[in-house]
Amino acid sequence: MDRLRERAREALASVTGRPLGPYQSAAVRIGFAATWLVFLVREFPHRRELYGPGGPWGFDLAERLVAGNHAFTVLLWSDSVLWFETVYAVAVLSSVLMLLGWHTRAASVLFMAGVLSLQNRSVFMGDGGDNVVHLMAMYLVLTRCARVWSLDARRTARTGPARGPAGPLLWGLLGLVLGHATVTDRLDWFWLAVFGWLWIAQGVWWLAERRGPGGPGRALLDVLANLVHNAALLVIMVEVCLIYATAGWYKIQGSRWQDGTALYYPLGLDYFTPWPGLSSLVAGSGTLVMALTYGTVLVQVAFPFALANRRIKNVLLAVMMLEHLGIALLLGLPVFSLAMIAADAVFLPTVLLLWLGGRAAVLRGAVRGLLPVPRLPGSPGDPGARGVPLPPPRDAEADPAGGPAPGPAPRAPAGRGGTGQP
């Protein structure tokens, strides 16, 4: 019993003391922000047909559907073209902000609002990839996904929490929008409560950061934020397992999957053949089609059970990512593949993510070395400057987010500096 109590105390301290998986949550944030941004840019010429006034799913039909399912979308606040273009531009901007990790707590709310607004306006225009982005956009709001690999982490490591006007101005602007929606009765009680609590939490957290790490209530806020983050990360992991498990078990029930010919048929459809020559080459080999068909079912069904063994999990994870790359190439579904790869990133080992971060830092340094660096009068590099002290050298293996180095060996960060915490 003493051993069980000790383990329970350690587990409670781990869950409440720090946000788990900082690199995994950052990878999920970057992956889904990039996926949604790629989709919005790719479909920019067709945006009005997909979600705007020029689409087959008209404004009246969308109002009738939303009145029944109570989904959130700001596109039904007005049927003007200007309002649609504004919402689309904000969706693109919020994706960029999430990708860079700039004021991520507010940007994540904008990102979620943009995803829900566009997708719920025309629900029949999406596919499986849109559904995954839809869910993950809501989960990311609850995570502390900017602890590393973000502009927020870099700023915190250099100067501490943000004290400039950008945060309060963004918070005030969002408050004005929320107040207008409340007064004009644009939101039902559920979404009003959701956005209201998020807005209040943003303000309380900003006030706590202004008082410093030792301020009153900051410890309690950290514990609550860690609990919510770790719970949301667990939900993301369970969601990915459910996606693969349900997909695999439903495939088992299909006769075409049972006889190993299911992959052959989409390879013959014009809609799913961006490279007809490559599709014909794969479809022409019965052995390859059967192996890919059975392999897909086997990997999807086995993955949730493989989480009990780290090595097997990593192997199946690599296989599934390669499978999604194949889907993007053979079937022409890049957004779906990118969304699933971004979701799979929650299971990537920390050692691999640290290695990728180090390679990205090296690449960034090489790019900077190719660009000319301007020298201002009186700077340390100015030949006329005398007696100007040189800045201290930066660690060559610093974290790519701008924080301290994770350590001499690639391992899971345990200290405050390795996770980019303020």
Image: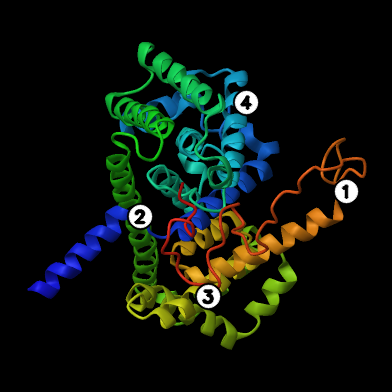
Q: Nearer the viewer, mark 2 or mark 4?
A: 2
Which residue is identified by label 1? Answer: 372
Q: Farthest right residue?
A: 384
Looking at the rendered structure, which numbered label has been put on residue 23?
A: none
Q: Nearer the viewer, mark 1 or mark 4?
A: 1
Q: Measure the alpha-carbon separation of dots 1 and 4.
A: 38 Å
Q: Quadrant of residue 21?
A: bottom left
Q: Nearer the viewer, mark 3 or mark 1?
A: 1
Q: In this rendering, does residue 36 appear at all?
A: no
N-terminal of the two: label 3 or label 1?
3
Q: Quadrant of the N terminus?
A: bottom left
Tag 3: Cα neighbours inside 10 Å, few (<14), some, or many (≥20)?
A: some
- The reply to whether callout 1 and callout 4 are in contact (CB within 8 Å) is no
Which residue is identified by label 3? Answer: 318
Q: Measure the alpha-carbon separation of dots 1 and 2.
A: 41 Å
Which residue is identified by label 4? Answer: 85
Q: Nearer the viewer, mark 4 or mark 3?
A: 3
Q: Secondary structure at mark 2?
A: loop
Which residue is identified by label 2? Answer: 18
N-terminal of the two: label 1 or label 2?
2
